[in-house]
Image (cartoon, rainbow, N blue to C red):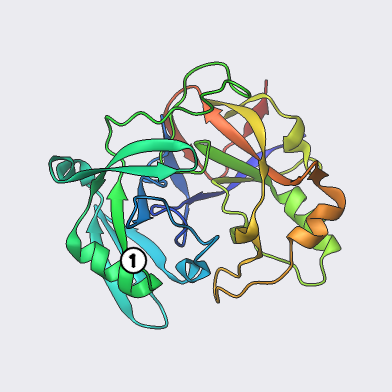
C-alpha cells in the first residue's frame, strides 16, 4: 500500500484563508507560519469563522518575509511582516483560546483597524511569540508527553486522506473541496478513513503520532469562497461519522522531530 503526501496547507492567521504549499517546515508548535497569528475581540477572546463566516473571504499569501491579507471582492489589502519576534517588546495582552489563556503580542494599530473594518467588529491582531508555551492536552487524555501548539484549536497538525474526502463526496449531492476541513496534510492511497486507525508514522523522516480524531464544527458548512452556509457536510457526516454528540473527520497529530516535508513524500506507518 503506497501512501503519499499529496497536499500541504498552512493558515497563517487563524480562521482566514489558507495557503497551499509544495513543502513546509515542521516545527514544535506546527508547520512554520501556521496559525501563529490570531484575531481577538475587545476582551481578548479568539474569534473565528464559527461566529464570523465573512472571515473566509480574507485570503492570504506569503512573499519572502511578508504576509499579504486581501479581500478579492473589495480590493482591500494589508501587508504584514512575518518576522514578528520584533513585536514582542510592544504591548502584550492575555488572550483566551478555548480553555487556554496565553500571552500574545499586539502587532499594530493599523492591522487592528484593517481587520475591524473587514470583519465588522472591533478586534485586534495578535502574534504568539516564541517564548510562549501553550501545552497540548494538559489533561493528558490523548497524548502523554509535552507538546506545544500555536493558535490552532487544539493540536499542531491535522491530516485527512483523499480517500476519506472521496467517500464523503460520494454521499453528497454537491461534492466539497478539501478547504472546508482546513487540514495541514492530505494524503493519497489507502482506504477511506484509514487515518482513524493510525498511531505512529513517518512523513519522509519526520515522525508523527495520530492522537485524536478531529470533531467538526459549523466552519465545515461555510463556503470558503462566498462565506455562505448550508447544512452540508455535517448533515451527511452525522449519518455515518457520529461518535456521541461529535462528528469526526480527520486526525489530529503531534510531531516528534523537526524538518522539511514536501508533496510527494512517502508516508510509512510504524
Q: Quadrant of the C terminus?
A: top right
The single residue placed furthest to the front in the displayed view is 43
Q: Quadrant of the N terminus?
A: top right
Query: Dot 1: within a 10 Å radius of its alpha carbon, few (fewer than 14), some, or many (20 or more) residues?
Result: many
Q: Is residue 23 left or right of residue 142?
A: left
| Whole-percent x, y for residue 131 in the image | 27, 29
Q: Which residue is mark 1?
A: 69
Identity of the residue drawn at 24% across and 63% down = 111
User: In this orientation, does residue 192 appear?
Assistant: no
Q: Is residue 135 above or below residue 191?
A: above
Front-most of residues 105 and 176 = 105
Q: Is residue 251 above or below residue 180?
A: above
Disc 1 element: strand
Identity of the residue drawn at 66% across and 28% down = 268
| Whole-percent x, y for residue 141 in the image | 63, 23
The single residue placed furthest to the left in the displayed view is 89
User: In this orientation, does residue 33 appear?
Assistant: yes
Q: Is residue 267 above or below residue 236?
A: above
Front-most of residues 181 and 164 = 181
Instruction: Tell how many labels.
Output: 1
Front-most of residues 189 and 236 = 236
In terms of image quadrants, where is residue 79? bottom left
Q: Is residue 145 left or right of residue 133?
A: right
| Whole-percent x, y for residue 202 in the image | 59, 27
Amino acid at each position: 500500500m503506497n501512501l503519499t503526501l499529496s497536499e500541504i496547507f498552512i493558515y497563517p492567521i487563524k480562521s482566514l484563508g489558507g495557503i497551499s504549499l509544495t513543502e513546509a517546515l515542521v516545527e514544535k508548535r506546527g508547520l512554520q507560519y501556521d496559525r501563529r497569528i490570531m484575531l481577538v475581540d475587545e476582551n481578548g477572546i479568539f474569534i473565528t469563522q464559527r461566529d464570523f463566516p465573512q472571515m473566509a473571504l480574507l485570503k492570504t499569501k506569503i512573499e519572502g518575509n511578508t504576509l499579504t491579507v486581501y479581500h478579492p471582492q473589495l480590493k482591500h489589502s494589508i501587508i504584514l511582516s512575518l518576522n514578528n519576534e520584533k513585536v514582542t517588546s510592544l504591548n502584550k495582552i492575555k488572550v483566551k483560546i478555548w480553555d487556554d489563556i496565553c500571552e500574545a503580542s499586539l502587532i499594530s494599530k493599523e492591522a487592528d483597524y484593517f481587520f475591524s473594518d473587514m470583519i465588522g467588529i472591533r478586534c485586534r491582531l495578535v502574534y504568539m511569540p516564541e517564548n510562549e508555551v501553550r501545552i497540548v492536552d494538559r489533561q493528558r487524555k490523548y497524548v502523554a508527553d509535552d507538546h506545544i501548539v500555536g493558535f490552532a484549536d487544539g493540536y499542531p497538525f491535522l491530516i485527512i486522506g483523499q480517500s476519506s474526502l472521496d467517500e464523503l463526496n460520494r454521499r453528497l449531492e454537491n461534492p466539497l473541496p478539501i478547504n472546508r476541513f482546513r487540514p495541514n496534510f492530505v494524503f493519497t492511497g489507502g482506504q477511506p478513513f484509514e487515518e482513524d486507525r493510525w498511531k505512529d508514522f513517518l512523513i519522509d523522516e519526520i515522525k508523527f503520532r495520530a492522537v485524536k480524531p478531529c470533531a467538526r464544527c459549523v466552519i465545515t458548512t461555510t463556503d470558503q469562497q462566498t462565506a455562505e452556509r448550508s447544512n452540508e457536510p455535517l448533515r451527511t457526516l452525522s449519518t455515518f461519522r457520529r461518535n456521541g454528540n461529535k462528528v469526526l473527520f480527520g486526525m489530529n497529530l503531534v510531531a516528534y522531530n523537526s524538518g522539511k516535508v514536501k508533496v510527494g513524500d512517502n508516508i510509512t506507518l510504524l
